Amino acid sequence: MTEEGQYIALDLLLCRECGGRCCQGSPGVWVDPERFFALFFAGEQLTLEQLRERLPGLGMVLWEKSGVPIPAPRSLSTGCAFLGENGCRFPVAERPCQCLALIPDKATLDLETGCACRLPAEFSRETGQQRWQDYWREVDR
Ligand code: SF4
Ligand code: SF4
């Protein structure tokens, strides 16, 4: 657990051997808006327009295709923009909730592509969309 109560499922040895297959696809996101704003804006509650202006400076973008705006690490053709030669450039405590919660599975090492690692339901895309939708409703009041 991090100080914000984020669940961590890292297996450093396995993930180092794997080289970040998960990061080479779509980046994970911060499922918990409160955790996101605590980490990057000292707990300040931003409106959508304020967040939109400040995200590029953090190397992040807004995912909006689902209809619910969610901040995420920028993507490159090689995967997440924060994936460096030595792994993730975020300190562990700041990494997206989904990245920390993904349960490493060594079966991934036997796959040519894709990832066998499992994301618990409470960190799913649907859960993230619901929590951000609730957050934006609260801010717009
Ligand atoms: S794909 Fe799985 S094993 Fe590989 S780095 Fe990601 S969590 Fe670790
Ligand atoms: S933020 Fe870090 S752990 Fe998450 S996908 Fe990007 S490089 Fe991987």
Image: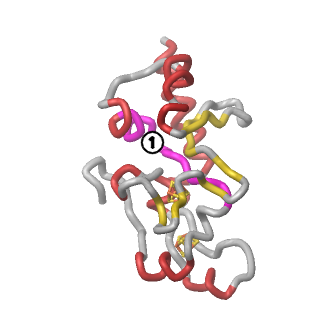
- Check the image and report above or below for 122 versus 43: below
The way the protein has been coloured in the rendering is secondary structure
Residue occupying the far left of the picture: 3
Quadrant of res 21? bottom right
In the rendered structure, the answer to whether residue 95 lies left or right of residue 131 reads left
Q: Vertically, is 6 above or below 128?
A: below
Q: Say whether residue 28 is magenta.
A: yes
- At horizontal 62% and vertical 49% (from top left) the residue drawn is 125
Q: What secondary structure is the magenta-colored segment mainly?
A: loop
Residue 99 in picture, x, y percent from top left: 50, 59
Residue 65, by quadrant, is top right
Residue that protrudes farthest toward the top in the picture: 141
- Label 1 neighbourhood size at 10 Å, few (<14), some (14-19), many (20+)? many
Q: Which residue is painted at 60% across and 65% down in the image?
A: 22
Q: Image quadrant for the N terminus? A: bottom left
In which image quadrant can residue 32 be found? top left
Where does the image place residue 8, in percent across and percent down from the top left? 38, 63
Q: Is residue 55 above or below residue 59?
A: above
Look at 56% across and 69% down and name the residue there: 20
How many numbered dots are placed on residues in this image? 1
Percent of width and height locating residue 94: 38, 49
Q: Residue at x 65, y 73 (%)?
A: 115
| Foreground of the two, 131 or 72 | 72
Which three-letter amino acid code belongs to the residue tagged 1? Asp
- Residue matched to label 1: 32
Which residue range is magenta in the image? 25-37
3 vs 117: above or below: above
Q: Which residue is more in the foreground, 56 or 130? A: 56
Does 48 appear in magenta?
no
Q: Nearer the viewer, residue 95 or 131?
A: 95
